[in-house]
Image (spheres, rainbow, N blue to C red):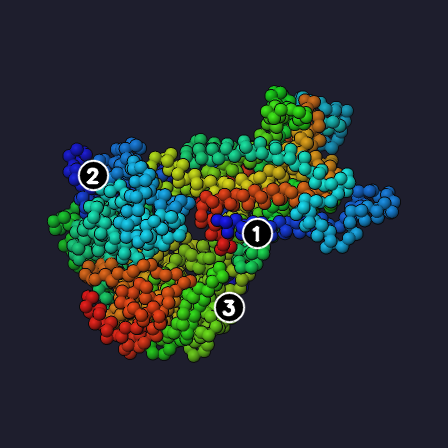
Amino acid sequence: MTDTDNILQRSVAERKQARRENWRLLRRRPGFIIGSVIAGFWVFCAFFGQRIAPYDPFDYRDTKQLSPNGEHWFGTDKIGRDIFSRVLTGSRDVLLVAPAAAVLGVIFGSILGIFMGYYRGWVDNVLSRIVEALLALPVVLVGLLVLTLAKSSNLVIIFVVAVLFMPIVARTVRAAVISERDLDYVVSAQLRGESNIFIMTREILPNITPPIVVELTVRIGYAIFTVSTLSFLGVGIQRPSPDWGLAISEGRDVLPANIWWLVTFPALAIATLVIAVNLVADSIQAVFER
Amino acid sequence: MSPTTTIATNALEISNLDLAYNVRGILRPVLRNVTFHIEPGEAYGLVGESGCGKSTTAYAAVRYLPRNGVITGGHILIDGDDITAMNRNELRRFRMHKASMVYQDPGSALNPTLKVGRQLIESFTILGQPRQQAAESALSALRKVQIADPSRVMGRYPHQLSGGMLQRVVIAMALACDPALLVLDEPTTGLDATVEAEVLDLVRTLRQETGAAILLIAHNLGVIRTMCDRVGVMYAGKVVEEGLANEVFDNPKHPYTVGLLRSLPRHGMHKSRSALATIPGTLPVLGSDLPTCVYVDRCPLADDLCRNEVPPLVEVAPGHTTRCHHIDQIAKIDQPRATSLRDPGTETVLQITSVSKTFRQSGNDVPALVGVNLSLTDGETLGLVGESGSGKSTLAKAILGVHAPDAGGHLTLDQHELAPKVSKRSAEDKRAMQIIFQNPDSALNASWTVRRILQRSVRKLTGKDRAATDARVAELAEHLRLSPRHLDMKPRQLSGGLKQRVAIARAFAGDPRIVVCDEPTSALDVSVQAAILNLLAELQSEQRTSYVFISHDLGVVRYLADRIAVMYLGRIMEIGTTEHIFTGPHHPYTEALLSAVPSVDGEPGNRIRLAGEIPSPANPPSGCVFHPRCPRAIEGVCELTEPPIIEVSLGHSIRCHIPADELSRLQAIAR
Amino acid sequence: MLRYISRRVLLSLVTLWLLATIVFLITNVIPTDPARAILGNTAPEASVIRFRTQFGLTDPLIRQYGRLLKGLVTFDFGLSWGTKREVWSLIEQPLFRSAKLAALAMAITTPLSIFAGLIAAKFRDRRLDRGIVLVGLATSSIPEFVTGALLAVVFGVNLHWFKPVATIPPGTPPLEQLQYLILPATAMTIAYFGYIARMMRAGTIRALDSDYVRTAAMKGMSSSQVMTRHVLRNAIAPTITVMSVQVGYLFGGIVGVELVYNYPGISQVVLNAAKKKDLPVLQVAVLIVALIYMVATLLADIIIAWLNPRARLELGQS
């Protein structure tokens, strides 16, 4: 075993220990438990929804626009598809796209933020201006603009949302790096001749992991928000997906005609998912920033 | 004791006070049966190391407790009124008229968003004065705290004033209501020595003028001794000894007081003659269960009696009490051991030649170091002293190559020239020079274990393979008395003293030639400081390492340094052996600095008062940079030309227009 | 102070220029043929060419970029591709209507969330505080169109308290317009209440725990005096920043609410433009909303600098 392996292995053990402690504290928070159960349910549905659904979510039949009844718990839509089955399977796309976008955005943003915070000076000044400008961009409208120009696909949505989240993550990470960078252990590392890359990745990064993880959980919530909104506006996830945002946009025309179930159930589904993610994010923040 | 039977004349009377912090539903005792009183106009000091409960007592005295603080027993009477029984309105009125408080950090004691004047005027309007009258009262209050142009200060925001000035404003506010009791919690900690002396002088004067009783909390025993009539020594939430300040300091009767006083470098002690006494072990954890003597685990006199019975309160002299079973054996506590350290060598290790450093700050040149020349021999400790802005830390960073000095300066290590920036220096040069920082929390990477911290330094500095690295880490740990258990911990799991040992071990990882010690003990309690200073002296003697030792504590520098350089505004004003610096003739600045130190030994000394504040390095005065504050400045000379640094005797140089003989004469008169 | 404002405005202009550049890059970096996309695959080549010359698409990129920058100064953004009308004239009225809705939403959200934050801080860790924090937390970042839809179902369709559709008939007196606007505004309030309230709570707690509040209490001030004279001024600064940022988000999220309620605001213009690939309109919409965000944050910074003189220094150092 080389020395680097040795150090790596040891740091893995350390991290495991810290993780176990965090996990113990998390499990004691009711918000975390409730949030995880709800979010876990929707993740389960994303994988197995189609199997547990009573009807095929894509199969349309003559039973058009039925209000909720014993046969169709949540009623049926304009072309006779079962809403209950569609709600159960509707988390599939958003739960793939939103977390992926959040993860990618946090990775991009962290890299940018670490560079800005570590080098300061003109590097930071120039990048900060750009980040400032990017922050001013309205996320939903730019999403609309780009997805109008490029053909919408899950991959494009992920990329667009990730890039739009990058500046705000960068700003958070930059602030965390700046307060670490002024600590003497960084000077000490320079005095023993460590490279800048080593200092950024091995010395500073482990110390700013908590805010990055918190940022990630918060971003997942916002990514669900953004992706659902784009789908609702018709440029996000495309038909015939049972996606909730899409479902609400399909049902909103007939809402004033008292056909309420097309909108209500997918809306409740989005609300529960976002609330669950928020509860989990808050618990993680409380534990990490203790 | 009921409130009616007490003598109403006492300014503060705390009787059998028990206080606990509620930590997740469990009450953790912090103060245990604290009892003491302060007579009107008296100054009472509380001393003890961090965590002993002295600040909690101070806040309890005005009933400003943290949200989870609970008084579980006892009474606090101020001017005869029991404040533990007061409701919200009574408490408010009591604070308005009877008691005031001054805290450690004057910068945060004032609202940053409001002008100083408005906040000061408020102190008077709240007492019912009309606005116009309150404004006048505010002006005269500022004059009373010796602020020269009060109307200018009133128009300033807190961040525009210096620490000393702010503390004066806070004191003026505290005295607005003419309180019966003034509580001062570390009022001068964090201020420069000359400023500290001024603030203490001011408090002394005001005490005479107002007749307020004072409760002073300070970790600096010298401050307590020079300010207080009586003193209480606290340990683990209990007052273990109490008496007249002079008596307690000169004739301590509790083993803890003895330990505390002996761990201080006093009476001109020097590492070459005697080690400092240390107190083994650590303070009991906050809120732990201490059924008998609170000091039993660390006491050299502890026996079964101490472990089984609560020591009684013994009156050893009128008004001098202690809580110890073995007062007859106090004299038997071991004196600090003598040392046999090697003297510094004569081989020059580091040569610094005309090193300057100029920072650019919003378009202006700020000279932080100006033409510094120094040399350092093997095994020698060079003390660097001076107040904020003196450039001592900048000099340290220039030596280490953290900041490259301005062109024209040279650093020579073992006869070869050093690159200005550390990144350009050879591996060998990096190994040769390391640093120990002031704050180990900042100096150690919080997410690494101690083992990884040491391994990485050993490997990076020496290039050893894995087995040799591990062996070296084990050797370092043993040397610094770190157990293998400590090696697998993270810094936050260690005490302050242990953390500093890790930092020292890291600095010594590659057998350095020079270690820069940047205030390495100023964040530590005195008993821990003593252990660290002993360790540094031993390591140096064994390894022939040279130290550049930065400290604001002249006692510490005097103990550890072989030579001392006194800096002011980026220049060396005086340099010489420790003997030279302390016996004179002194540079007028050195003289002022020495006289500003409040002495634990109670030596009477004439204070040299310095006019004004330390100027900003961005805008240094003309001629001799010290002339605007110098009590001995010669008009027509000092403000025009900067004096050269002149060798007045072998190895002793002073930067002053006044000849050395004249300085000697003037300073003999002043004494 | 004046120096601070001028510096801050200057920086905003730099940001604005960068912003325009970024938007220009987005629209040009994605490989599309707008003329083809708008006219369809069957359109004759000649009309495609005519389209391109008419809208200056054959000009060098640098000139197109120049036109965009000039537009930002003169508010003359040229013609819309779809309707062949002035872009600004298309956007102006709907933008005003959106602003009306946003203003109503802010007018409800601001006092409500600041008050809730103060109350939560004052009763820290008690049941009331936990309740406010939990409600705020749970509801924040639920998309406005979701809450909008649910509110429409409950209060519009089932209870008939308010109109589920916000197409206000012309000539409706302002007070009666509220009946149409209250549901969408409430949906937005729900989305933004939590974050602002939490920020206010955190700021207040920080101020309450500070040394200067202790100083004030030791002077003998009552807790309400301490609150109004010392706490509020310091506590509100981070909340002001957050609110200014939320104003930007508000215009992003408003599109969803407007669509739910069929409100003739910016959403109709934008969605029409998206459908017809009318790039200039989308571009300008993005820029205008970004401009609103920038003006809001600029104002916030100036207010904070006015409240707290130390904030003025920080810009000088960065």
Please provide percent x and percent y for residue C53. Answer: 81, 49
Cα distance in 3D space between marks 1 and 2: 60 Å
> Relative to residue C147, is residue A22 drawn left or right?
left
Badge number at residue B79: 2
Under tag 3, what secondary structure? helix
A271, above or below C47, in the image: above
Q: Is residue B205 visible to the viewer in this orientation of the structure?
A: yes
Badge 3 amino acid: Ser
Badge 2 amino acid: Asp
Disc 1: which residue: C10
> Relative to residue C245, is residue B430 drawn left or right?
left
Question: Which quarter of the image is occupied by the C terminus of chain B?
Answer: bottom left
Q: Earlier along the polypeptide chain: callout 2 or callout 3?
A: 2
Cα distance in 3D space between marks 2 and 3: 64 Å
**Residue at horizontal 22 percent and vertical 64 percent from the top:** B267
Nearer-the-camera pick, B477 or A249: A249
Under tag 2, what secondary structure? loop
Please provide percent x and percent y for residue B469. Answer: 46, 66
Tell me which chain the residue with mark 3 is part of.
Answer: B
Tell me which chain the residue with mark 1 is part of.
Answer: C
Question: Looking at the image, do the residues carrying marks 1 and 2 touch, with CB atoms under 8 Å apart?
Answer: no
In which quadrant of the rendered view does residue C268 lie?
top right
In which quadrant of the rendered view does residue B516 lie?
bottom left
Badge number at residue B423: 3
